Amino acid sequence: MVTKSSARAAEAPESASLAALAKLATASYQSLEHEFGAKIAELEGQALRLTTLIDSISQGICFFDADERLILSNRRYAEIYRIAPEQMGPGLTLGEIVERRVAAGTSAMSTDDYLALARTVNSGTASRTWTASLADGRTIQVCHQPMSDGGWVSTHEDITELATKRQIVDERISLQTLIDWVPDYLWVKDTQSRFVVVNSALAADSGRDKTSDMIGLTDFDLHAPELAQKFRLIEQEVLNSGQPMIDEEEFVVDASGAGKWLSSTKVPLRNTANAIFGLVGIAHDITARKQADVLRNGQAEILEMIAMSAPLEDVLDSLMRLVESQLSGIFGSVLLLDKDGIHLRHGAAPSLARDYTVLIDGIAIGPKVGSCGTAVYRREPVIVADILQDPLWEVYRELVAPYDYRSCWSTPILSHQGAVLGVFAMYSMTVREPAEAETRLIDFTTRIAGIAIERKLAEDQIHFMANHDVLTRLPNRALLEDRLSQAILYAQRYDRWVTVVFIDLDNFKFVNDTLATMPETNC
């Protein structure tokens, strides 16, 4: 029989074991609880850091699982679509989110259409980007990336300002392209006369590679101070008065040194408040027209001089100046053929070096006498593109070298009967041949010079014949009377005497009249 005391003795070790096991279990639980708590705290910390990181991103971000339920999104995603962040929690379906966007007026399409689009994009593996124009005027760019488990991640960015800037840039580029097609100068200036818009034609002639190189510059950066100040005063008058300047002729020198005549129009620019904030200008190159006017007027003046029997040297000098006004870097010269038919005499050369014209005055014509002497000898134009290399100038190279004349184009001046009267030459400081416009001017000049020279010779011949005997070429009675009247007037003025001596030749009249009627070949 087991007694109570023995039973208690038997239960004591078992209780001790259970107590130890319970204690061990408690310790294990506490240890696991502590370990899991640390892990949970670590995971919570990581989640907080991840949430903070995602919320700091300027783009809206959202993650969806394969069931189209929101896993995670940042505050920016809710803000973009005007939804309170607390209403954009995990577990919401895409349909529910789109319905809230529709209610907020920030959905570009209906719920069904948006879901159809999202599912179509998510059915593939490639990412896709598109823009949506919201009813409030904003533009949202969506980048959608499908995931391998059937879910997806997408970013949403408000690019309204960026799109506006791009539009402005595109408009500016389009405007620049448009004005660059304009062959005339076109520009816009601010109230301080600084360029803010310039087309390529003006930039190129101002020596700038790009139109942007002109922005901020003024006319003082482009022209001589006197001209720049003149432009400045004109523009200030336009800005102050509000009255445009229409089709005013202005002369400028471009970056290459070429002079140009422009017809300029400058108009004040006004904002919506009607305040002037700048001016726009456009200038058309009228150099060709001005030159044509000068040429036409010059031709008329020279022909008038010829008709009025002006001195030949004055006519030729005006003709050379007219030629030089039409061309850049060209010096005109006329040499006249002497009565001996062998030498060339100075006619006109207003811009050639004086010493050089003296050196070539009286030069003889020949097969290798520079350009002029050779042209008269050959009776045809002679074009020498490089004086220092052409054999025609071999003997005269040292003579011309100090004056830096490198090209000389000479054309004989012929009468209407084909007789050589002289030679017209164009000198250039550069090695080249004449351009088409210069060739036309050469033809015109030689014709006018020929008319002037031939008229002068005819007048001299008429005057000689009127005062000399045709056969003997001795002074006749008309000349005697003229000289006698001059002598009498001189004597009366200075209280002098006049003496007349007569020489009588027997039968001279008979002999003279007889020979005068004979054919010229028998004289």
Image (cartoon, grey):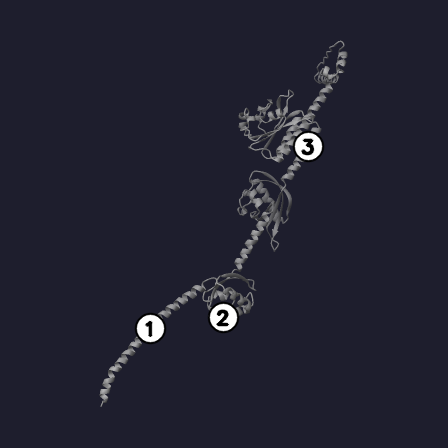
Question: Which label belongs to residue 458?
Answer: none
Q: Amino acid at mark 2?
A: Thr
Q: Along the line of sight, which residue is nearer the eye, 286 or 42?
A: 42
Q: Earlier in the sequence, mark 1 or mark 2?
A: 1
Q: Quadrant of residue 260?
A: top right
Q: Position of residue 272 (x, y in %)?
A: 61, 55
Chief SS of the magenta region: helix
- The residues tagged by marks 2 and 3 sit, at their Cα atoms, a distance apart of 95 Å
Q: Disc 1 versus disc 3: distance between alpha carbons? A: 119 Å
Question: Element under label 3?
Answer: helix
| Nearer to the camera, 250 or 106 | 106
Measured as percent of width and height from the top left, residue 299 is found at 68, 33
Label 3 crowd bin: few (<14), some (14–19), many (20+), radius 10 Å: some
User: Residues in magenta?
Assistant: 29-34
Residue for badge 2 = 93
Give the left or right position of residue 169, taking residue 523 as reference.
left
Residue 32 is inside the magenta segment: yes
Label placed on residue 32: 1
Residue labelled with disc 3:
301
Q: Position of residue 253 (x, y in %)?
A: 58, 39
